[in-house]
Every structure is written in C-alpha cells, then in structure tokens.
Image: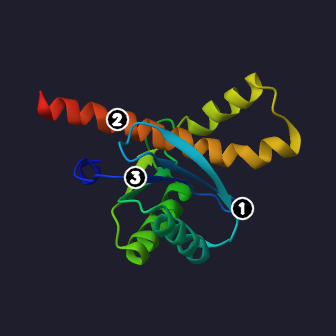
Amino acid sequence: MERLIQCKGKLLGVDFGDKRTGLAVSDRTQFLASGIGYISPGGLEKTAEAVGACAKEQGVCAIVVGLPVNMNGSEGFRAERVRRFIAQLEEQTQLPVVPFDERLSTMEAGRYLNESDTRGQKRKQVIDTLSAQIILQSALDRLRFLRSQSSG
C-alpha cells in the first residue's frame, strides 16, 4: 500500500480469474470505485496485455489486484498464480501493481447479488466486475485511512 500513497490520479482495480477478469476504476480523487466490466482473454500473458491496455486507456497511475488469501492468512496455489500475474502486469505496464487481500470480496459480491435478486447468466456477467469494484473500494478506503494517519 505504501507504493500507492504517492500515486495521484485514477487507480485500476483487478479481480484476476482464469475465465473472466473483473475491472474497476477509481475517480481522480481516489474516493469512489466504479466497475467498468470484465475481460476474458485467457491465460496470464494475454490477460496482462489486456489489463495493461485498459490501464493505459483509463490513464491510471497504479493498479490494485485482488490477492486470494486463505482465511487463516496463508497463501495457496491461487495466490501464487496471482503473484505471477502481478509480476507480468508490472513488467508490461511499468506501473506500480499492488496486491490487496481479497479474502471476502467475492462473498460480499455474492451477498449483494443475492439481495438484489440477480441470478443465472446475469449474475455471471456482473460478479467479477462487482468483485473488482469491492477490492478497489476497500483499497481506496484503506489508503484514505493510511493517509489520514500519516498527516495527523
């Protein structure tokens, strides 16, 4: 998170998945995250290229990628794969790419979709985007807290 404190401008949030990768972007003040859709290029390299293109198009100063951490804090195979994706994305974009604990983001997204009675195919189309938005909003909230601690 320290690498994000100096970043001024929009941030891109990413929920990396093998089939679909959700995307969200913040406003320039880093107050609010908005889902912008998902991509399905497949594979680490192609997904890193597509996310890199989105980062350039959106004009972001950094990227936040959800890191799937187990409930006990350990990291498994999925986290290792995401770390490889982060390394590729950072090399490709030359931007700071920061992992962010996504432990409960998919569960939170699922709960929201249940409450809004979003089911079936429509649910599949929005869950990854919503997860990216939740990851990014959580990172923005944490960033705001860290900045307030360092200035006070």
> How many angstroms separate mark 3 from mark 1 (CA)?
26 Å
Mark 2 or mark 3, which is nearer to you?
3
Query: What is the image's colouring?
Result: rainbow
The amino acid sitting under disc 2 is Arg
Among numbered discs 2 and 1, the one appearing first in the sequence: 1
Q: Secondary structure at mark 3?
A: loop
Q: Which residue is mark 2?
A: 142
The amino acid sitting under disc 3 is Lys
The dot on residue 64 is none
Observer able to see residue 108: yes
Observer able to see residue 102: no
For the view shown, which residue lies furthest in the right direction? 120
Among numbered discs 3 and 1, the one appearing first in the sequence: 3
> Mark 2 packing: few (<14 Cα in 10 Å), some, or many (20+)?
few
The amino acid sitting under disc 1 is Lys
Labels 2 & 3 near each other (Cβ < 8 A): no
Q: Residue at x 13, y 32 (%)?
A: 151
Q: Which residue is mark 1?
A: 19
**Which residue occupies the foreground of this view, 75 or 150?**
150
Q: Residue at x 24, y 47 (%)?
A: 5
> Mark 3 packing: few (<14 Cα in 10 Å), some, or many (20+)?
many
> Where does the image place residue 83, in percent across and percent down from the top left?
45, 62
- Would you say 133 lies left or right of 145 here? right
Labels 2 & 1 near each other (Cβ < 8 A): no
The dot on residue 10 is 3
> How many angstroms separate mark 2 from mark 1 (CA)?
28 Å
Among numbered discs 2 and 3, the one appearing first in the sequence: 3
> Where does the image place residue 59, in percent across and percent down from the top left?
42, 63
Q: Residue at x 39, y 70 (%)?
A: 90
> Where does the image place residue 51, in percent across and percent down from the top left?
54, 66
Count of numbered circles on the image: 3
